Amino acid sequence: MTLELNNIRVAYSGKTVIRGITVKARAGELIALVGPNGSGKSSLLKAVTGLIPHEGQTNLPPDTRTRASSLAYLAQDATAPVRRKVRDIVALGRTPHIGPLGKLTSNDDVIISDSLSRCDMSEFSDREFGTLSGGEQMRVHLARTFATQAQILLADEPVTALDPYYQLTVMDALRGYAGKHRTVITALHDLNLARRYADRIWVIQDGILVKDHLPDEALDIETLAQVFRITPDGQSL
C-alpha cells in the first residue's frame, strides 16, 4: 500500500511545527525520517496515525477499525503493564484481526511466534515485561507492532535504547518487514543506519520536508552542513 500525505500541517499552541508536507511512501520501501531534534519527526508520524490534530489529508481509511488493521505505530514512549507476560503483550497486535469473542486462532499463534523470533525475543516469551531491560522492552513493542501485519508501519526512534548489535537486528527486521511489500517509515537519529538501510530518506527541518531522495543524494555534503551542521566525516561545523 502506498501512503500518500497531502499538505499535512500541525500546530501546537499557535506554533506551526509541520508546514505543509506532501510526500509518498510506496509499498516495499523503508523510509528513514531524519532531522535535527525538534524538527518535527515525531509530530509528523503522530499526525499520520491521527494521534494529534492536523490539517491536510492522507489516503488511509477513515474508519477506525480498518485503519487499525492497515497501519501500526511504535511510539518512543511505548509502555505495557510490568506484570504482563511478553507473549501476551505481543498478542495485542492481533487485536484488530480477531473476532468478536477475542479468541486467538492457531494462525494468530504462528504470527505471534514469528514476530517474537524476528525481534530475537522468543526466549523471553514467558518473562514478565517489568523484568526486562529498556532495550528488551522496546523489542517487545516492535514484535507487537509486527504482529499486526499492517501494510504500513511507523516507528519513532525504535533503536535509540539499543546496543549496536540489537540496533542492527531491529533494522534488519524492519528491512525484512518492508520486503514483504509493506511500507515502513522510521524516524532515526543515526545517519549511518539511515544510509545503510533506507530505500529513500526524508530529511525534515523546521517542519519542512527538504529532501526526499536516495540516501546518498538526501545526505549530501550540502544537506549535512545546512541541516545537521556536520561534515561528511561527522565533525561539527
Image (spheres, rainbow, N blue to C red):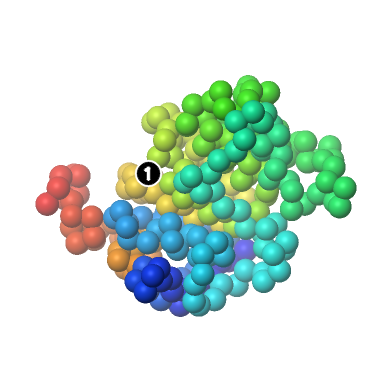
Q: Amino acid at mark 1?
A: Leu
Tell which of 220 and 39 is nearer to you: 39
**Placement of 234 over or under 203, stated as above or below:** above
Question: Residue extending furthest left?
Answer: 237
At numbered mark 1, what does the secondary structure look like: helix, strand or loop?
Answer: helix
Q: Is residue 148 visible?
A: yes
**Placement of 93 over or under 213, stated as above or below:** above
Dividing the picture into quadrants, the one containing residue 38 is: bottom left
Residue at x 67% of width, y 69% of height? 61
Residue at x 64% of width, y 23% of height? 127
**In the displayed structure image, the side of residue 163 where residue 132 appears, left or right:** right
**In the displayed structure image, the side of residue 132 where residue 39 appears, left or right:** left
**Placement of 169 over or under 39, stated as above or below:** above
Dividing the picture into quadrants, the one containing residue 59 is: bottom right
> Residue 5 location, x and y as percent?
51, 72
> Residue 233 location, x and y as percent?
18, 44
Q: Is residue 209 visible?
A: no
From the image, tell me which residue sits under label 1. 193
Question: Residue extending furthest right?
Answer: 101
Residue at x 23% of width, y 55% of height? 228
> Residue 125 location, x and y as percent?
66, 26
**In the displayed structure image, the side of residue 169 where residue 67 appears, left or right:** right
Tell which of 160 and 178 is nearer to you: 160
> Residue 213 location, x and y as percent?
37, 63
Number of marks drawn: 1
Residue at x 41% of width, y 76% of height? 20
Q: Quadrant of the N terminus?
A: bottom right
**Placement of 84 over or under 201, stated as above or below:** above
Mark 1: few, some, or many residues within 10 Å (few <14, many ≥20)?
some
Question: Residue extending furthest front?
Answer: 13
